[in-house]
Amino acid sequence: MTQSLLMCPPDYFGVQYSINPWMNSQRGKVDLRLASQQWQDYFSLLQKFATIRLIDPEPHVPDLVFTANAGLILGNKFVQSNFKHKERRSEEPLFREWFQSQGYEGLALPDSIYFEGAGDTLFQKGANLLWAGHGFRTDRSAHAILKKDFRIEVVSLRLVDPRFYHLDTCFCPLEDGGALYYPQAFDSESLKLIEEHTAPEKRITVSDEDASHFACNSVLLDRNIIMNYASAKLESQLNKAGYSVYICPVTEFMKAGGANKCLTFNLDPFQENKNQGIKKNKMPLAV
Ligand code: ARG
């Protein structure tokens, strides 16, 4: 099945504030022409493997390009993000309206619970399992609500390195129970959980060098993995594991702390529980 991805053209992208360590020294330093070129090249490459849907770019929300943070979809429900930083909160209604216009039922967690959508929640293909990050942007209490209301196994992983503040910056679920990840971004309990829930021979851990080039922030479309960077060693490990590696640099977007995966939102996540009835009226707040 062809996957659909949501993206946002970078017309108004830039680093205008700093809410993660990558942005600290980059204010006003984005080359918008290069960013547009990189985005366009990436978009063209993704079109070979997926259907791309677009949300209109808007001024004053420079991080809207990072559609991974829109929210989370479960069946026909869209759980919007409650951004931790006020700088990104005006993206919430824009994403909500887009998903509602596509027929999704919009839901929200209580305002006091931070949740940054698919940046911090990743489905494991072939399992009724959602990996969920906490520690920087998403509150752990959000995980418990998702687990209860959506009848899905949620494995909570604690992020400990501020450079890897979203789960998708340091963890990428792979096929057949595998995962690509940067161990140093997690506490020891979380590393045990990763080991318990993945197949040992399908785990690929990345070096500091690969991690700091956002190698884990990859998009997996069948056996094609699209990433900003991979060392020769990582590329050969991925090839041996049966993946075709496409290097597609998005260095201008890294200045804002995001790369390939952050620039996409998977509209067909690997949900095994799609048809299980989601308990009605259980979500704290419908919008
Ligand atoms: N500047 C954005 C932020 O700090 C980058 C978001 C990256 N997105 C992601 N899914 N990791 O929120």
Image: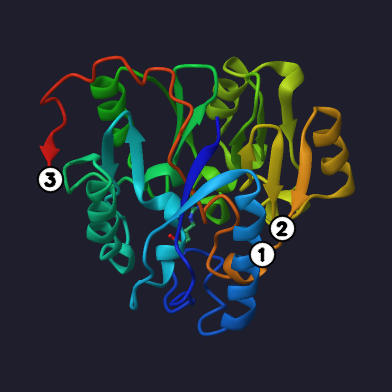
Up/down of 147 relative to 100, above or below:
above
CA distance for labels 1 and 2: 8 Å
Circle 1 is placed at which residue position?
41
**Camera-nearest residue between 101 and 93:** 101
- Residue 3 rendering spot, x and y as whole percentages: 52, 38
Up/down of 16 relative to 47, above or below:
below
Up/down of 33 relative to 68, above or below:
below
**Camera-nearest residue between 189 and 175:** 175
Asked if residue 207 can be seen in this view, the reply is no
> Are the residues at dot 1 and dot 2 in contact (C-beta closer than 8 Å)?
yes
Per the image, label 3 sits on a secondary structure element best described as loop
Per the image, label 1 sits on a secondary structure element best described as helix
- Residue 122 rendering spot, x and y as whole percentages: 48, 34
The quarter in which the N terminus is drawn is top right
The quarter in which the C terminus is drawn is top left
Circle 3 is placed at which residue position?
287
CA distance for labels 3 and 2: 37 Å
Q: Residue at x 56, y 51 (%)?
A: 164
Circle 2 is placed at which residue position?
248
Q: Residue at x 48, y 77 (%)?
A: 14
CA distance for labels 3 and 1: 36 Å
